[in-house]
Amino acid sequence: MSTVRFLHAADLHLDSAFEGLRAGKAVIRRGEQRQLLQRMAALVQREQLQFVLLSGDLLDSDLSYAETGEALCACLRQMAVPVFIAPGNHDYYSTRSPYARLALPENVHIFKKNEIESVLLPDLGLRVYGAAFTAKDSPALLPGFHAAHEEGVLQVLCLHGEVTKQDSPYAPIHEEELAQSGLHYAALGHIHKASGLQKAGNTWYSWPGCPEGRGFDEAGEKTVNLVSLNEADCQVQRVSIALRRYECLDVNVTGVDPLLAIHSQLGDNTAQDIYRITLTGEVDTPPDLNRLQLNISDLFYALQLRDETRLRRDVWEKAGEDSLRGLFLKKLRAAYDAADSAERRQLVEQAARWGLAALDHREEVIVHDDF
């Protein structure tokens, strides 16, 4: 049985809203998402892959733009190899879904039923099983399933679903079912963080995660899977085709100028990426986030700053002054000393910070969410 090489991708979520970005940049990002399709097609051609498994949620909803449908069809046609699509909970198949309206090229097979079906590709020595979400949820589809042994034929599955020990509305899969399935490889989707190559019994499986992040909950490197499979072995190479990354960076500014501290921790190539920088540590005065934003925003495609620093304990040194500041701090110090937990003391310190910032005509906390 020869080795086959193929692309396994999922969870593109084309036409995502990008609600964390300003309207203009959200439009740009949706256009850039469509460019993912071109890069996937180029990868298939460059690596001379033999087929493609797309395990659902290619679209974020059934309200996709016409340009996205056109780009998707063009990408699939350009791949020029068999492509299998297993619609997920966001792009579930129905007579009203974009998949039903699009003129998909002849090399594409889309699974349309909420039950396991298969397609034999004799030239590749391959049988591809798959199923579709036909609503926003799906029952478990693998209980009792077993791929019949066929001499010289690899058995693979393309499915949107999560491997879990718990009940789930999203086509839950149990490792025991995979171990008893008779499959050589299960190409899964739904979870946005890549799993790496896993094995249950004699069945290899993985989910590639999303190929490009859409928010800080999808930070870091995002990839698709380039899979080499034969009867005895499986290898997965994670390949990045993303244009931008979301990154979260914590910067301790204790005893250091915040601007210098940020620069010392930044990599060389940040201009393409979207950063959330959180300042931590102990400070004498609250960081001036507006000043920082003005000085470093050009280093990123978009930037969010957060201040989680804490004032040094000597914040209370003027609590005895005969002044508004002194009276304010004296009252809060009493609350601090009476606090019955570290969490309560932290809240009192934060209240002191806000109050002192107001007295000094500073903006204590600025969260730049609307970028």
Image (cartoon, rainbow, N blue to C red):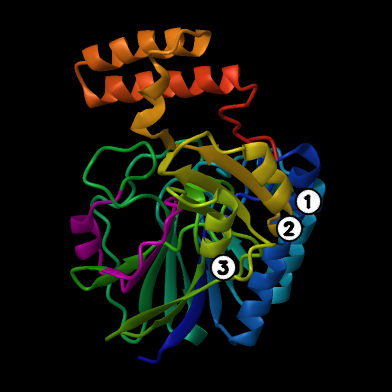
- Does the image show residue 132? no
Q: Which residue is mark 2?
A: 32
Which region is colored magenta? 173-198
**Foreground of the two, 302 or 118:** 302
Foreground: disc 3 or disc 1? 3
- The quarter of the rendered structure image containing the N terminus is bottom left
Q: Horizontal placement of 24 versus 227: left or right?
A: right
Q: Amino acid at mark 3?
A: Gly
Q: Amino acid at mark 2?
A: Glu
Query: x%, y% of residue 183?
Result: 30, 69
Residue 181: say if magenta.
Answer: yes
Q: Give the CA separation, mark 2 to mark 3.
A: 23 Å
**Foreground of the two, 77 or 145:** 77
Residue at 22% in and 57% down: 175
Q: Secondary structure at mark 2?
A: helix
Q: Which residue is mark 3?
A: 267
- The quarter of the rendered structure image containing the C terminus is top right
Neighbourhood count class around disc 2 (C-alpha, 10 Å): few under 14, some 14–19, many 20 upward = some
Foreground: disc 2 or disc 3? 3
Does the CB distance between marks 2 and 1 fall below 8 Å? yes
**Foreground of the two, 24 or 208:** 24
Q: Give the CA separation, mark 3 to mark 1.
A: 24 Å
Above or below residue 44? Residue 147 is: above
First reached walking from the N terminus: tag 2 or tag 3: 2
First reached walking from the N terminus: tag 3 or tag 1: 1
Q: Quadrant of residue 313?
A: top left
Q: Horizontal placement of 227 versus 37: left or right?
A: left
Q: Give the CA separation, mark 2 to mark 1.
A: 6 Å
Query: x%, y% of residue 53?
Result: 51, 67
Q: Which residue is mark 1?
A: 28
